[in-house]
Amino acid sequence: MIVAGIDIGSLSGKCVILRREDGEKVVSSAVILTTPDSEGTARDVMHKALAAADLTIKDLSYIVSTGYGRVNVPLAQENITEITCHTKGINWLFPNVRTILDMGGQDCKAISCGEDGRVLNFVMNDKCAAGTGRYLERIAAILDVPLTEVGPLSLEGLNTPVEIKSYCTVFAERDVLILLREGRSKKEILAGACDAIVKRIATLMLQVGVRNDLSISGGVAKNIGIVRRLEKRFGMNIAIAPDPQIVGALGAALFALARVQ
Amino acid sequence: MSFLRYLEEEIVRYDKRVQKILANPDPTKPKSNYLMYELERDNRISNIEAYKAGKPFATGLYPPTIFKALGLEVWDGVMASDRTGGEPAKRYFEAVQRGGLPYQVCDRTVISIPMVISGDCPKPALVVSTNWECENIPLCHNFIGKYYDLPTYYLDVPLETSERTLEYVADQFAELIEFAERYVPGAKYDEDKLIEMQTWELRWNKAYRDIYQLRKRTPCPLAGKEAFREPRWPTLYHDPSRAVKYIETYRDDLYEMADKGILPVKEEKLRLMWCISGPFYDDPFKYLESRGVSVPWWQIGNMSRVSGVGSTGIYGEEKEYGRKLSLLEEEARIVNQSAWGGLGKRWIDDALFVCEDLHLDGIVYFLQWGCTVTVGVGKILAEAAEQELNIPTLLLEGRMLDQEVYDAKKFREQLDEFLDICLENKKKLARKKANELVDKI
Ligand code: SF4
């Protein structure tokens, strides 16, 4: 039996094709950029994933959509919310995970889940840039450091971090300029920025309650500076999905499979 | 004159609504809606007439009963802000940003300031600033007082209710009356008028209590939006008798509709409490109704107490203090039991009481940005609701009038997710109850 999960996010469209044999197996996946036409994005990303597995739409028994544009995917038989699908996907990958931090450029979610992969509680911050990837993007831009180097450099500055007192991104940018003028190094400033963002994330996570294991996904999962700091802050095992971008689509595909069984 | 233009625009707006309802009545909505719009329209007409006649206005949300007894007109700036949406709201927010004013404070208080500066509300002759409300509103009233250099009375409301605090506040009311008579030309206290005002308040309160009883029915006969119909005291209006007539007719309409089976949700899957504020430029309640969810109750600081639920007493009741109170003590009793500027414990106790009393399955707590009094209460309420009632809470934040930071899709996403959690929890609680019953047998 073959099914598909489609995740239409605000930036990218993802699709996972899942096959049930002895267990569930990911047959293929695809990621493309989202266009204003959610329906077209869904069709394109699905065809890309199907082509990679040498399949056609007729081979699919069920399709579930998720994500920001999930209601505009007519080819899906059902749509399920993003948080539920994301949690399902993480639970399949890491059955011991009970807390999930999903932090992208635009928002940040802390989710508490049960052993069956059900969402027990969640909080989302999509208002304050200080709790999302935007904060680090802005600071990296001022320091002229590629985003991929922010994490490693912030670890090098661990012993002499500076304190960025302002949570607000606008004021933090001003703090960074002052620190640069005072002669503090980029590493030290990045260490301070990562410390600040971890404090903010921790507040969000504490709202849902933090239980072992912890999984991190979204763009922040690639920032080793944040991951290490969270590991230290909560003293927890951290699980990171091999391909964090497709976790939501994976969850949607798992729901699709459950529907046809 | 800007003030008149502002009110004239509002008069046109309300008149359009009245005409629309009269021309095309919607049987699914309370018939008395037209009375409400008529009341709002005519109140603004009276405001203009009073302003033109040079009558003194008092501002401050409390005590309108005493303002009236002093022969003053009442300007309720907070409610005026609440009802400001669309273009005017945008204009005020821009004025706030241009002026470098505190933009990130709660919307209803942010908007009040450009309203004053632009002369869109009457220049009052008296300001009463009180900690009976939250922190931001008295700050806003202080600003109005200072901006116009007006006689401003600071009313201090204690955090506890006792004979001593009753006397303390009643003495302040006596002082306020003296203060107004001394500094506001034309102000003259009339005790009979205060008795009359308290009588109107009492009748209004009784109607509101009746409406509360209706909220207990399953399915809830009130649409989600109806829960948000603000409890606006009759004495805030130029003619309190019309405000009372409206609320009593509204109550009768609701009962009639309920008895006829005109229900917003036919098969009620969930019942939720909505707290603090909401995206009033959108209609999440219609969406919730489409999913079989009713919102029988909106909890803000004073909501339950104003409507008589969980309050320790209303005008004329003798139980609480074991004696008949004087007129000013009656006023003191009402402010002293406030939850708005009162202890967080009152907020929590009131909310939990209503959740249990109305059999609610969850709480949506929409934190208004910049609201200093409720910022920490959400988390405490969520924990208390979980521990004491086993019901979940969705913590959201946003702005009630400024749509700039609102993302409808994300908002719905969070609601959807929360509804799933509530449904699952409801099933779990039902299973637990059934097992307990079986164990008993
Ligand atoms: S939302 Fe908060 S700050 Fe604003 S008026 Fe209400 S209680 Fe005060």
Image (cartoon, coloured by chain):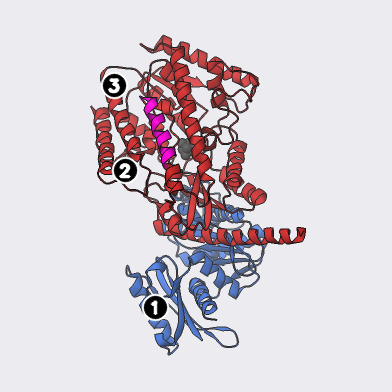
The reply to whether residue A143 is in sight is no
Name the foreground residue: B64 vs B319.
B319
Judge if badges 3 and 2 mark residues of a common chain.
Answer: yes
Q: Amino acid at mark 1?
A: Val
Magenta-colored span: B238-253
User: What residue is disc 3 on?
Assistant: B51
| Label 3 SS | helix
Q: Chain of mark 1?
A: A
| Label 2 SS | helix
- Front: mark 3 or 1: 3
Main secondary structure found in the magenta portion:
helix
Outermost residue, top side: B182
The reply to whether residue A168 is in sight is yes
User: What residue is disc 2 on?
Assistant: B90
Image colour for chain B is: red
User: What residue is disc 1 on?
Assistant: A45
Quick check: marks 3 and 2 in contact, CB under 8 Å?
no
Query: Is residue A22 shown above or below A84?
Result: below
Q: Chain of mark 3?
A: B
